[in-house]
């Protein structure tokens, strides 16, 4: 299973990619929702998406999460934001929310839990 990291800030995206790779997961990345949809369409093993909320383009990360839930229901979702507070009721069913800056441990634990690896990538 591959994790897709979506964030328009290159340094933040790189940090997330490294964090997830160091936890033992294969990673793909996208700079915005439109690019993320293209990656999902051509990468059938995407099983989880970590997306920022505040991004330019046709969709923000919250709209991307809902779009993915509707079109690819098996894909698990983690939504992160440093600027916009998101209520659980605004998230798609089963999605998790983390505020930036987040601690690596809880985020990676959520990745492991949602990916179904139970702590092992």
Image: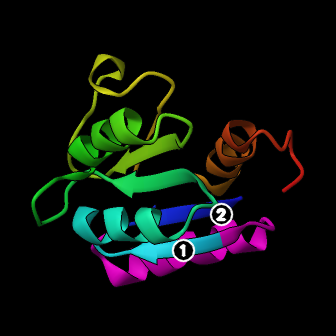
- Residue at 21 percent of width and 50 percent of height: 83
- Highlighted range, magenta: 7-26
Q: Which mark is residue 28?
A: 1
Residue for point 36% across, 21% down: 88
88 displayed left or right of 86: right
Nearer to me, 90 or 59: 59
Q: Is residue 92 left or right of residue 5?
A: left
Q: Position of residue 6 (x, y in %)?
A: 39, 65
Query: Which numbered circle lies on residue 74?
Result: none
Disc 1 crowd, CA 10 A, few/some/many (<14, 14-19, 20+): some
**47 sits to left or right of 121:** left
> Marks 1 and 2, how far apart in space?
7 Å
Q: Residue furthest right?
A: 120
Q: Along the polypeptide, which appears first: circle 1 or circle 2?
A: 2
**Is the Cβ of the residue at disc 1 closer than 8 Å to that at disc 2?**
yes
Q: Quadrant of the C terminus?
A: bottom right
Residue to which mark 2 is pinned: 2
Above or below, comparing residue 114 to residue 81 in the picture:
above
Q: Going by the picture, which residue comes out furthest to the top?
A: 89
In the image, is residue 63 above or below residue 24?
A: above
Residue found 48% across the figure and 54% down from its top: 50
């Amino acid at each position: 299973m591959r994790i897709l990291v979506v964030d328009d800030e290159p340094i933040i995206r790189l940090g997330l990619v490294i964090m997830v790779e160091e936890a033992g997961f294969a990673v793909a990345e996208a700079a915005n929702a439109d690019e993320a949809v293209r990656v999902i369409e051509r990468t059938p093993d995407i099983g989880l998406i970590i997306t920022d909320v505040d991004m330019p383009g046709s969709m923000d990360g919250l709209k991307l999460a809902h779009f993915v839930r509707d079109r690819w229901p098996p894909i698990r979702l983690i939504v992160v934001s440093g600027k916009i507070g998101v209520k659980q009721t605004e998230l798609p069913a089963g999605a998790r929310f983390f505020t930036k800056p987040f601690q690596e441990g809880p985020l990676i634990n959520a990745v492991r839990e949602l990916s179904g690896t139970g702590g092992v990538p």
